[in-house]
Amino acid sequence: MVNESIICAGFGGQGIMVLGKVFATAAMEKDFHVTWFPAYGAEVRGGTAYSMVRVSEEPIANPIVEQATAAVIMNTPSLEKFEKNIKPGGLLILNTSLVKAKVKRKDIEVIPADLTEEAVRLGNIRVANMIAAGIYAAKTKIFDKKVLLKVISIMAAGREELVPINVKAVELGEGSGSFPTPHPEAQRAEGSL
C-alpha cells in the first residue's frame, strides 16, 4: 500500500517548490490522494525553503509531514533541520555538492549525489531538483519515468524549450549509481521548470 511522506528542502532558488509539485502532480497522474504543503523562508530566493508532499491510496487528513518516508536535502541547514524527521528505514537523497556535514543517522538509507555539480555538467544548474526526482522515482517505484516526463511537459507548458534539459536530468537521476567528477569548465545556465 502506498503511503509516502516526502520532505524537499534547500535554499530558495533551488527548485524546492517545483520538486514538491512534480512529486504531487506525478502522484495525481497515478490517481493517488495527494497533498502539497510549501513553506518559504523570510528571504525566499537564497533563504530556506521546504515543501511537504503526502501520497496515499487513502484520503489524507493532514498535509504536515512530521515523519517522512523520504527526504531530498539540498543544503546543510536543511539537513540539520530535517534529518531527525525521517522515519527509521526511510530514504535520504543528499546533495553532496552543497552538504558537507555528515549524516548522523544510521537507521536510514542515504543516497549521496552531487546534484548541483551534475546539473552544471548537464548545462543547467537549476535542474538539480529533477536529477533528485529521477533518483526518487528509480528508488521508490511509486511512479515511473513516463509519468515524470508527462509532468515535465505539463509544467513546462508555454516554455517547451525547458523540456529537453529537464528530461535529461530525470534520466540521469534514474540511471545514477555514482556520478563522475564534474568538469571544471561546465556552464551554469538558466532555464529549469
Image (tube, rainbow, N blue to C red):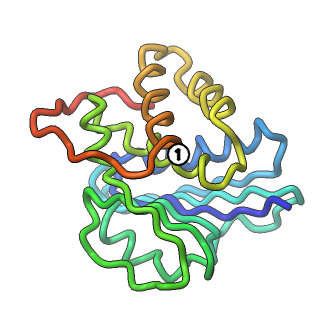
Q: Residue at x 55, y 56 (%)?
A: 38
When the figure is inspected, residue 127 is found, relative to residue 156, above or below; the finding is below
Q: Residue at x 64, y 69 (%)?
A: 69
Q: Extreme right residue here?
A: 58
Q: Describe residue 134's horizontal placement relative to residue 188 as left or right.
A: right
Q: On the image, numbered disc 1 is attached to which residue?
A: 133
Residue 157 locus on image (x, y percent): 56, 18
Helix, strand or loop at mark 1: helix
Q: Nearer the viewer, residue 91 or 62?
A: 91
Specify whether residue 39 is in view. Answer: no
Q: Nearer the viewer, residue 92 or 26?
A: 92
Left or right of 123? Residue 55 is right
Residue type at the position of mark 1: Ala
Q: Quick one: label 1, few (<14), some, or many (20+) residues within 10 Å?
A: many
- For the point 80% across and 40% down, the residue is 30
Image-quadrant location for residue 10: bottom left
Q: Quadrant of residue 43?
A: bottom left
Q: x and y percent of residue 111 in the render?
A: 45, 62
Closer to the camera in the image, 17 or 4: 4
Count of residue discs: 1
Q: Is residue 152 visible?
A: yes
* Quadrant (top left, top right, bottom left, bottom right) of the N terminus: bottom right
**Residue 135: percent from left, percent from top:** 52, 49
102 shown above or below 112: below
Q: Residue at x 62, y 24 (%)?
A: 154
Quadrant of the drawing holding the C terminus: top left
Q: Residue 26 is drawn in which quadrant?
A: top right
Q: Position of residue 126 (x, y in %)?
A: 33, 38
Whether residue 154 is situated above or below residue 41 in the rendered picture: above
* In the depicted structure, whether residue 123 falls above or below residue 74: above
